[in-house]
Image (cartoon, helix red, strand yellow):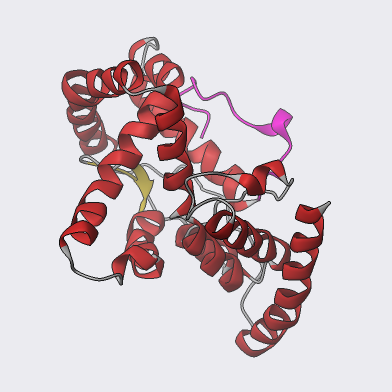
Amino acid sequence: MLGEIIRRRFNFRFATILTSIIVLSGCSNSLVPEDGNDPIEGVNRAVHSFNKGLDTAVLRPVSKGYGTVVPETFRHVINNEVRYVQLPVTFANSVLQGNVERAGDTAARFFVNSTLGGLGALDPATDMGIPEHSEDFGQTLAVWGVGSGPYVELPLLGPTTVRDGLSRVADTALSPLTYIGQGTTTSIVKAAETPVRVVDTRERFGSLIDEALYESDDSYTVVRNTFLQRRRNAILNGNIDAETLPDIYNDEAF
């Protein structure tokens, strides 16, 4: 009940703000799904082999060790913090997209988890029924009508598109971690945020990642098509007919 009241209050306030933003900006609401364009497949496959080798030698064993050694409660807190620090990015992109509901939900989650959740260590917002969303500047550009451009697999960073890869710079600028102080503790937090997020994600989705990388006939095709399918779903906020989705294992599906 309290979560619903908080959610409605934030949504009402941001509806007024975002209406003004939309009218002034005149941004496009057309959604542009990924087109699966892969003109440099040969280069991408070489980078994929490098990334897969890195996962085999480093990331996979580290994530398994993390899941074995670190207590589940502590891992839960780490995951809460990883999601918490992304909330300002999601909020900013929801505003830029003119998405009143998601901006309000995200602001409410940030407020509740900052106060009642000990700066994100706990997640009372979920217990209150406040929805969680994820938005980035690549999705924002898609809402504005910017096409995805060619598919690219980057060393260390993995699959992306030209649009989504370049948008990571904007998301970094939207993150509050970019602007907090320069003390020793702050520097450690900044340096640790990305590797902790990567290891946490690899551990949580380990079985799915292993299936794509090590249990398929062509891991490159599966990774590429899965990424493009997930991006389509993210850009459309889940409003997609599952029956129309192509087979991720089929190289001709996209």
- Tell me: 233 left or right of 6: left
Task: State the residue at coordinates (30%, 70%).
Answer: 180
- Is residue 63 at all visible to an observer of this figure? yes
- Secondary structure that dominates the magenta span: loop
Name the quadrant containing residue 102. bottom right
Count of residue discs: 0
Q: Residue furthest right?
A: 1
184 or 57, nearer to the observer: 184
Q: Residue at x 80, y 64 (%)?
A: 8
The quarter of the displayed image where residue 112 is located: bottom right
Tell me residue 50's x, y (percent): 17, 29
Q: Residue at x 48, y 31 (%)?
A: 226
Q: x, y (%) of residue 71?
A: 38, 22
Q: Which residue occupies the foreground of this view, 121 or 248? A: 121
Q: Nearer the viewer, residue 173 or 54?
A: 173
- On the question of residue 205 being in view, the answer is no
Q: Is residue 31 above or below residue 29?
A: above
| Point 20% across, 41% down: residue | 155
Among all residues in the image, which is located at the extreme bottom?
Answer: 24
Q: Nearer the viewer, residue 24 or 71?
A: 71
Q: Is residue 109 above or below residue 206?
A: below
Relative side of 53 to 93, left or right: left
| Residue 156 pos. (x, y %) | 22, 39
Residue range in magenta is 237-254
Locate residue 12, reporting x and y percent: 79, 73
Toward which corner of the image does residue 95 lie, by quadrant? bottom right
* Magenta stretch holds residue 248: yes
Taking 217 as reference, is 53 above or below it? below
